[in-house]
Amino acid sequence: MSGADILALGGLLAGVLFVMGLKGLAHPRTARRGNMYAMAGMALAVVCALLGPRVAGYIGIAIGLGVGAAVGIPLARKVKLTALPQLVAGFHSFIGLAAALVAVGMFLREAGFGLVDAKGAVEMAVGTAIGMVTFSGSIVAALKLQGWVSGTPWAWRGRHVLNASLVLALLACGVWFVGGLGVWPLLLIFMLAGVLGVTLVAPIGGADMPVVVSMLNSYSGWAAAATGFMLEQPLLIMTGALVGASGAILSHIMCTAMHRSFVSVILGGWGAANGGGGAAAGGQPGGGSVHEAGIADAAFMLGEAERVIIVPGYGMAVAQAQHAVKELFTLLTGRGAEVTFAIHPVAGRMPGHMNVLLAEADIPYDVVQELEEVNPRFKETDVVLVIGANDVVNPAAQTQAGSPIYGMPVLEAWKARQVYVVKRSHRPGYAGVDNPLFGMDNCALVLGDAKAVVEGLVQGIKHG
Amino acid sequence: MMDISVLTMLVMVFVLSCMVGYFVVWGVTPALHTPLMAVTNAISGIVVVAAMAVAGGAHFDPRLCWVVRCPYPEHLGLMQGIAEGLGIVAVALCAINIFGGFAITWRMLAMFKSRKQVGKEGKGA
């Protein structure tokens, strides 16, 4: 067995460790061990690469790794968990850019000696294109999530024509590059793909952002795999495929949770038209007038309840109400009530975001349940407390065939004996759709800032 | 020795890895989908292996041009230098993902506690 074989087997072991790392995420108990496997895999992969014949100079690499550690670790330690989606999108952009730079760099290294053949050129062109689309698309997504540019979809007329022309231009440059092996067509691909990333992601926004983030996660994996084909590195292909599959599955889960087709999300523009339409329709359909309840009433009912389900939405996190909610949870369980949290897959701005926000507030993961698990339990529940969520508890998704959210899986909060919805105002939710739940007899709105209301509930129950 | 090309072998690796990824990721509990994204951020930093080959790759000897056809002999040094610079930037970008991705995953996973663990800490405090 040669040295190259041993290093290749080291790479294989790293790939196996990555798979075990993902496997560990099947349960919170095994997740930390999984993360350690993945870290060991990465360390092994880097060491094997350093020992390999491709690497001769170490100073530049050491500088690069040092800069990465100096930037990455403080970033990860300081970021607010509500800002996770934009951090993750930012990370995707780095991988995209790195893959594109590697492709161009590889070309410059090899082209000087005429070592690039047609097959290598195709792989370089593909790597550059996927990398740059991932890069600029993720930058736009991160800016939208951060609120530095408008988060609403920018749906301009003729964008499909523009995108199609960009793709055609990319293909033409690809043919030109493979035919002539010059540096200019490659740079043109680099720039055109960068523009395409912006024009692809800009029209998508609003409630579709979790899909965008998942999709870019997938792209970053495919970019890594493309780099692997270019360098004939099986480890990059394995890892890229794992990441690509992961992002694709998350996109699929998010689309199912919103009852949207992936294609319609990608084509974009949703939310821009709908938001206007829903608001213009106005009023509260469903016949009943909207009830309002005071904090004292809600506190009394909660204090008496044996079974309580709390439905948190992104509004809870925006109001920084998690810790007040944790206090309410401790108080109610201390009084012998059974308290469960119900999470809709699209609560929050990325898959699983709400679970992390609840975990941060020290709410144990075994009282947090997913949609399928919790839905049968609403009918046995005394009080449901909806905090900063709206569309995910909208019965119109099951009853009104004309509603934009018809068919979307929702939390069946209305089946409980009493529902309290903590809301800032009477305005409709993110999707701009009216919610007949608010007109139902067993539902009352508690108006106010989520944090203040929940703190009020805690005081009310303590002194009630 | 088998008569199949390297590309075919790599395609096989790719397809099988997609299958493995598909089944493993469906097994991830929805509660951990955000840590899943963060850890995939970290492991996609594997591009660093390629970036290191560009940043620290062996300098080809210009005398190689006596044997192979060099299209731009006068720009050789410049091209190698730019490639090295791009490689170093790529290494740094990947390293941000690796260190940042694992650190944020670690931070998140440390917060996930069962009822028992939360109860114990509550009594301890």
Image (tube, rainbow, N blue to C red):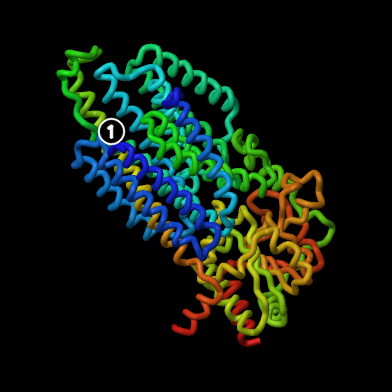
Q: Who's the residue at 28% across and 33% down the image?
A: B54
| Rendered view: A73 above or below B9 | below
Q: Who's the residue at 47% across and 27% down the image?
A: B8
The N terminus of chain A: image quadrant: top left
Residue A234 left/right relative to A268: left
Is any part of residue A192 visible from this angle? no
Asked whether A6 or A248 is in front, the reply is A6
**Quarter where residue A270 is shown:** top right
Q: Which class describes the residues within 10 Å of circle 1: few (<14), some (14-19), or many (20+)?
A: many
Dot 1 falls on a residue whose secondary structure is helix
Question: How many callouts does the rendering have?
Answer: 1
Where is residue A353? Give x, y as percent.
54, 57
| Rendered view: A218 above or below A75 | above
Residue farthest to the right, as pictured: A287
Is any part of residue A418 visible from this angle? yes
Q: Chain of mark 1?
A: B
Where is residue A325? Give x, y as percent.
57, 72
